[in-house]
């Protein structure tokens, strides 16, 4: 069954018709040509498809497009403003927190969402004091970024990049 | 008078495609724009051996939006199926679980997937065998190992040396099946055009020319009429080092719908039967030594599996032929041919599992002799290659070990075997050597052209799979041309460019860089230092006689600190440090990332990776990224990679070796040895899961 929905992708209003089975990831990649979010597993196991959905990080492969009619979707491409890289993307580049680059847009979106979560005081498995403000030390960053796999093993540089931005 | 320029080679230049990658705008295979593409979804065999006697396609064909359903009954015959891996849909025989038995081409991915699910296959099942069990299986000697070296070698009087040994280590080490799992699943976007027949592939591959050659042969096309491009590739680690069955299936599908682009991305689950994997190994190591740990004999017997479809041997014993001095040595490789998917290259094929066995055995020998593990390796340092007698082009293992020991604080350890307790954690340190052949493969061609804009265009059909090759080759080109990197425009990733060898075996930078140097030399000979616009020269890398004169290897030393939880057996690795001897480093930024990345994959192999095959049905039970664990961010603590300041004068004009693989080699042994030091338990089988430490 087909349904027509509206998505605001990287600041642009897009009206599209999708199969009700279409994931948000496939809607972006196959229907809208927005290929910044990547498909690494299609099962919510790798994080390569991470986008910001109304400013929160989500796995777009586990989201059905029809369930997000009217939503604002920001991809790593949309984080860049007027050819200026987002500070997180800039830091990932400066620290060489990437190799093949396939997980990278997801890492960048995930880091942006994670920094907002930490700023809002959300605890993680690594948080010692659940009532205090979150202090993003390396253990916190590693824990909070562990939903984003990187087979090239760029984790240490990704952590360094996020540390720089959060510090 | 111009200011002296910073040398291009050796500068930590940021990845040229970095901005495109951090924004996600660098196009990978699937993302190649296409008008009204069709989507392919395959049907995979659900039995491990037998025949697909009837494939019911009617329901699938009736589904709206389905353009074609391919089976062995209607698929066109291929021109060349001598390599059985490429005989896709050419018969009803099923040789392994997860083989292609049908495929659907449809308007949307959802429709293709639904239709594939509607295809019903009847099988005539035959008994199968999928698990390696060397004690109870017919083993054969492989024809030739992956590198063309003989499967078995023997030097000196092995039995006499073993009999004479004061200290003997005789143990069996096991490594599991591992799957490469690059983040980008294998993907081919195929377009078949007619009059004349012409096939274009946008492919996720480590070698555009190798895929082109295979596809031209399989489909009976003139290579000129096959084009393969791969501008960006999301990792491969060997699994994209050759054409695979999915390339052929995409080609067949495209031929069924000429003029329409067909997109075919494997799912993560598909990858566990279709793109290769590292064979499990069972390795017996015998080390005979005198009381001081000087080796008299090294014996390495390695057994792995292969597929009945096509032979591939994991050459785990090669490292024991050259690693340490000993008057006698023997190595053997045996294979069990089973009803399994075809194993293939996975990062440091041979060396990675082989050095887990050898370097764990060396740690056992050190302990048995009461010699420090670093010192033991120094004592067994060979002056020349023990196998060939050739001089080393540069063997600096001892310096790697010494510098690593100093940087790591190795000698602060309590040398006694564990357990060493720190609260609820058992803490230990371990060391292991690393090795990887230095390669410079013949056959690459490069072209240099001077443009009217004052820039040089350097073209070569190389591929950057995340190694940083695009950046490194640009730096190499600038050095060869004696110009700033900004005046070099590098073109790679397209089979229409001059032919290049595959991005594998840590050979890319070395082989392609050699061709670039030769092309620049030829260009200068022809056009001089001040060429006119349009000046152009193409040259092939010439034969390097030093490749036969010297034993060329990179070396390294890994150090690891391991903590094992006394109650849960949880294994943590807070610290890893490696020192490497890899010749000259072209780009310290990208080289460090590759070395560290290899170490992280070694950590991943040490702690997690294991594809569990169900003996009843032949499939990988944990065939996705939830079940097949790879190292995550939280697994990685401190990780440092250092290298010696050096150049290899014999390998290539740059003096630089590839660094893609050596980081993984030996890392699991260093971690296992550290776990032994921490707990007192010796684990001779990967991965080091918590259960192994709960006794």
Image (cartoon, helix red, strand yellow):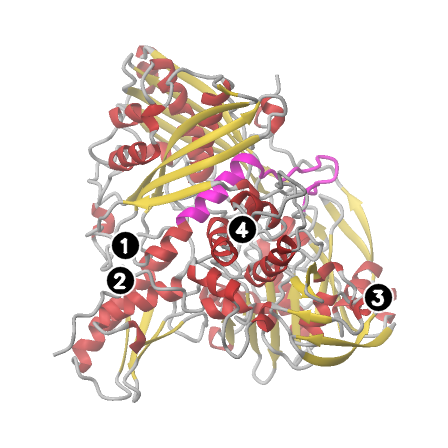
Q: Nearer the viewer, residue B149 or A74?
A: A74
Name the residue carrying label 1. B656
- Between the residue at mark 4 and the residue at mark 3, the CA separation in whole angstroms equals 36 Å
Do callouts 1 and 2 mark residues in contact (Cβ within 8 Å)? yes
Do callouts 4 and 2 mark residues in contact (Cβ within 8 Å)? no
Tell me where residue B339 appears, x and y as whole percent: 65, 41
| 1 and 3 marks on the same chain | yes
Name the residue carrying label 2. B9
Q: Is residue B300 left or right of residue A35?
A: left
Closer to the N terminus: mark 2 or mark 3? 2
Taking the spot 31% from the left edge, 14% from the top edge, the residue there is B160
- Between the residue at mark 4 and the residue at mark 2, the CA separation in whole angstroms equals 27 Å
Name the residue carrying label 4. A151
Taking the spot 30% from the left edge, 45% from the top edge, the residue there is B643
Taking the spot 27% from the left edge, 59% from the top edge, the residue there is B10
Label 1 crowd (10 A; few <14 / some 14-19 / many >=20):
many
On whether residue B620 falls in the magenta region, the answer is: yes
The numbered dot on residue B60 is 3
| 4 and 3 marks on the same chain | no
Dot 3: what SS? helix
Q: Is residue B634 left or right of residue B71?
A: left
| 2 and 3 marks on the same chain | yes
Chain letter behind tag 2: B
- The reply to whether residue B313 is in sight is no
Q: Nearer the viewer, residue B503 or B470?
A: B470
């Amino acid at each position: 069954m087909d349904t027509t929905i509206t998505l605001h992708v990287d600041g642009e209003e897009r009206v599209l018709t999708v199969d009700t089975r279409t994931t948000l990831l496939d809607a972006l990649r196959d229907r809208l040509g927005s290929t910044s979010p990547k498909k690494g597993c299609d099962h919510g196991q790798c994080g390569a498809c991470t986008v910001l959905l109304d400013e929160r990080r989500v796995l777009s492969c586990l989201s059905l497009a029809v369930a997000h009619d009217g939503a604002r979707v920001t991809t790593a491409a949309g984080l860049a403003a007027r050819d200026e890289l987002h500070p997180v993307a800039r830091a990932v580049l400066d620290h060489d927190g990437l190799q093949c680059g396939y997980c990278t847009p997801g890492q960048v979106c995930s880091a942006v969402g994670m920094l907002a979560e930490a700023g809002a005081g959300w605890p993680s498995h690594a948080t010692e004091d659940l009532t205090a403000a979150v202090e993003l030390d390396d253990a916190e960053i590693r824990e909070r970024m562990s939903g984003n796999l990187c087979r090239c093993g760029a984790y240490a540089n990704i952590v360094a990049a996020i540390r720089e931005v959060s510090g | 008078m111009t200011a002296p320029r910073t040398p291009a080679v050796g500068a930590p230049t940021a990845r040229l495609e970095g901005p495109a990658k951090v924004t996600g705008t660098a196009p990978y295979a699937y993302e190649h724009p296409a008008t009204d593409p069709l989507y392919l979804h395959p049907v995979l065999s659900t039995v491990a051996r037998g025949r697909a006697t009837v494939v019911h396609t009617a329901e699938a064909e009736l589904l709206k939006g389905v353009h074609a359903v391919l089976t062995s009954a209607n698929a066109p015959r291929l021109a060349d199926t001598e390599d059985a891996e490429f005989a896709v849909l050419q018969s009803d025989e099923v040789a392994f679980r997860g083989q292609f038995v049908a495929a659907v081409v449809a308007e949307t991915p959802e429709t293709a997937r639904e239709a594939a699910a509607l295809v019903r296959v009847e099988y005539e099942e035959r008994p199968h065998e999928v698990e390696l069990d060397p004690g109870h299986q017919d083993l054969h000697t492989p024809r030739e190992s992956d590198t063309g070296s003989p499967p078995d070698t023997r030097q000196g009087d092995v039995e006499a040396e073993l009999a004479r040994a004061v200290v003997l280590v005789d143990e069996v080490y096991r490594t599991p099946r591992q799957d490469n799992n690059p983040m980008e699943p294998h993907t081919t976007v195929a377009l078949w055009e007619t009059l004349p027949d012409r096939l274009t592939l946008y492919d996720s591959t480590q070698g555009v020319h190798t895929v082109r050659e295979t596809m031209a042969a399989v489909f009976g096309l003139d290579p000129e009429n096959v084009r393969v491009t791969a501008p960006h590739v999301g990792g491969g680690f060997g699994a994209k080092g050759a054409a695979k069955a999915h390339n052929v299936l995409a080609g067949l599908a495209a031929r069924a719908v000429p003029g329409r682009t067909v997109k075919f991305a494997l799912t993560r689950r598909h990858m566990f039967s279709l793109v290769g994997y590292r064979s499990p190994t069972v390795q017996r190591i015998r080390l005979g030594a005198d009381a001081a740990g000087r080796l008299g004999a090294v014996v390495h017997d390695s057994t792995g599996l292969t597929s009945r479809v096509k032979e591939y041997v994991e050459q785990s014993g090669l490292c024991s032929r050259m690693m340490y001095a000993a008057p006698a040595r023997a190595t053997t490789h045996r294979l069990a041919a089973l009803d399994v998917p075809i194993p293939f290259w996975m990062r440091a094929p041979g060396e990675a599992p082989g050095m887990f066995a050898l370097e764990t055995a060396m740690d056992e020998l050190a302990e048995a002799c009461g010699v420090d593990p670093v010192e033991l390796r120094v004592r067994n340092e060979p002056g020349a290659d023990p196998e060939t007698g050739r001089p080393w082009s540069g063997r600096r293992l001892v310096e790697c070990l010494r510098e690593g020991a100093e940087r790591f604080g190795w000698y602060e350890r309590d040398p006694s075997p564990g357990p060493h307790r720190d609260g609820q954690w058992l803490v230990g340190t371990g060391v292991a050597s690393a090795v990887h052949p230095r390669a410079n493969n013949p056959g690459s061609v490069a072209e240099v052209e001077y443009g009217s804009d004052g820039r040089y265009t350097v073209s070569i059909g190389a591929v950057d799979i995340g190694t940083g090759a695009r950046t490194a080759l640009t730096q190499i080109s600038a050095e060869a041309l004696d110009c700033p990197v900004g005046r070099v425009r590098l073109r790679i990733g397209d089979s229409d460019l001059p032919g290049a060898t595959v991005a594998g075996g840590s050979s890319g930078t070395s082989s392609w860089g050699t061709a670039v140097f030769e092309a620049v030399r030829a260009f200068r000979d022809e056009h001089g230092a001040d060429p006119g616009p349009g000046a152009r020269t193409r040259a092939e890398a010439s034969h390097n006689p030093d490749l036969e004169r010297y034993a060329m290897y990179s070396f390294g030393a890994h150090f690891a600190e391991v903590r094992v939880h006394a109650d849960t057996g949880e294994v943590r690795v807070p610290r890893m440090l490696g020192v490497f001897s890899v010749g000259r480093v072209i780009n310290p930024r990208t080289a460090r990332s590759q070395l560290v990345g290899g170490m992280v994959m070694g950590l991943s192999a040490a702690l997690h990776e294991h594809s569990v095959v169900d003996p009843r049905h032949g499939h990988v039970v944990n065939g996705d990224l939830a079940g097949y664990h790879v190292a995550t961010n939280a697994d990685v603590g401190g990780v440092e990679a250092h290298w010696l300041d050096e150049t290899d004068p014999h390998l290539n004009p740059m003096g630089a070796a590839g660094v893609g693989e050596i980081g993984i080699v030996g890392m699991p042994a260093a971690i296992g040895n550290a776990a032994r030091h921490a707990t007192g338990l010796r684990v001779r089988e990967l991965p080091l899961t918590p259960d192994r430490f709960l006794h």
